[in-house]
Image (cartoon, rainbow, N blue to C red):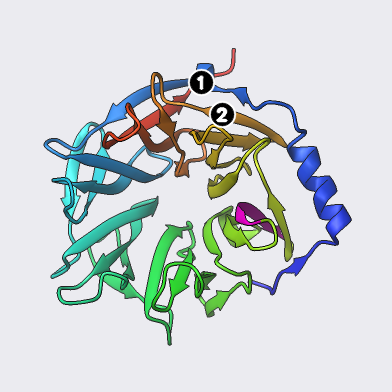
Amino acid sequence: MKPHRFLPAALAALITLTACSGNPVAALNDSYTFTRLDVPGAFQTLPSGINARGQIVGSYFKAEGGLPSGFIYDNGEYTTVVYPGAVLTQLRGISGGDIVGTYRMPGEPSINIHGFILTKSGEFIPVNYPGHTSTIAQRILPDGTILGCYHDGDQMASMHGFTKGRAGFSEINTFASMNNGATPGGGKVVGLFTDMAAGKQRAYLIEGGVFTAFDAPGSTVTSAWDINPNGTIVGLFGDAAKLTHGYVLERGEFRTIDFPNSVYTDVFGINGLGDIVGKFRETATGPFHGYVATRRPVT
């Protein structure tokens, strides 16, 4: 990836205001059919990614306070995935049959985490950013490019978004950043970062080396977690009432996504058909459940 450059402040603000016109965010629920996802016997289920075939990956907790295992959901069937010898496994992204995720080995500090690829042939391949303690592999593209972030002994201050392609690793210099998704070929990259001047977490889009921060209208925090080949961005935002909603940003327009009768909803993955996955809560302190929302045909 080429080093990014920041837009002049006035131009960046204009783009942000154009995309987030300041009007209340309209709901998009009627455009989807929602299906709840719960790994059998799990306390919590957290989907993270979906591919064009509708295969879903994520992680689940067997019990409150436990450590997660990975899962694949395919045509109604759940399969557990555990990195060999690991005490923690999370699956985060899927493209074709290749999956990326994270793991931790026994005896390691809780802050440590490492990335991996699980190939379509069933081979586990570690992914670790050289010279750094922790690597999160968040998303994989059709050409095998991986996106995510690295850390050194903390969860924010040393975090930087990275891309790993055939030429190796490259990173962005934005503070507390994480690359979470990209269009095929990496022409557009989305993620999240902590804006110290604004005092909050914000989303970003990198296109043609230009870094543009953006926020959902009226939000106190915004994260971008994925983008599909059509350029549709998904993520989550928090509002003044301290509620969390999922969103879809399509053709410059924000729309909210809320699982029916939930008090919390986010969106973590989207495929080329516009189908999305994420998690929701039925009560403010209850466990998380997963969902897939299938885009209905336009009539």
- Residue drawn at x 15%, y 73% is 106
Residue 92 locus on image (x, y percent): 36, 54
Q: In which quarter of the image is residue 231?
A: top right
Farthest residue toward the right? 10
Residue 221 locus on image (x, y percent): 58, 46
**Residue 189 in view here:** no
Quarter occupied by the N terminus:
bottom right
Mark earlier in primary sequence (2, 1) = 1
Q: Identify the residue position indicated by label 2 in the image.
A: 256
Cα separation, mark 2 vs mark 1, equals 8 Å
Label 1 neighbour load within 10 Å: few <14, some 14-19, many 20+: some
Residue 45 locus on image (x, y percent): 26, 40
Q: What element carries label 1?
A: helix
Asked whether, in this view, residue 149 is left or right of residue 213, the answer is: left
The magenta segment is 199-207
Does the magenta portion include 293? no
Quarter occupied by the C terminus:
top right
* Front-lying residue, 175 or 114: 175
- Residue drawn at x 63%, y 37% is 249
Which kind of residue does numbered mark 2 sit on?
Thr
117, above or below 231, in the image: below
28, above or below 137, in the image: above
Q: What element carries label 2?
A: strand
Residue 29's mark? 1
Asked whether, in this view, residue 119 is left or right of residue 78, the answer is: right
Residue 268 locus on image (x, y percent): 45, 44
138, above or below 255, in the image: below
Residue 263's mark? none
Does the magenta portion include 206? yes
Do the numbered discs 2 and 1 sit on residues whose CB atoms are within 8 Å? yes
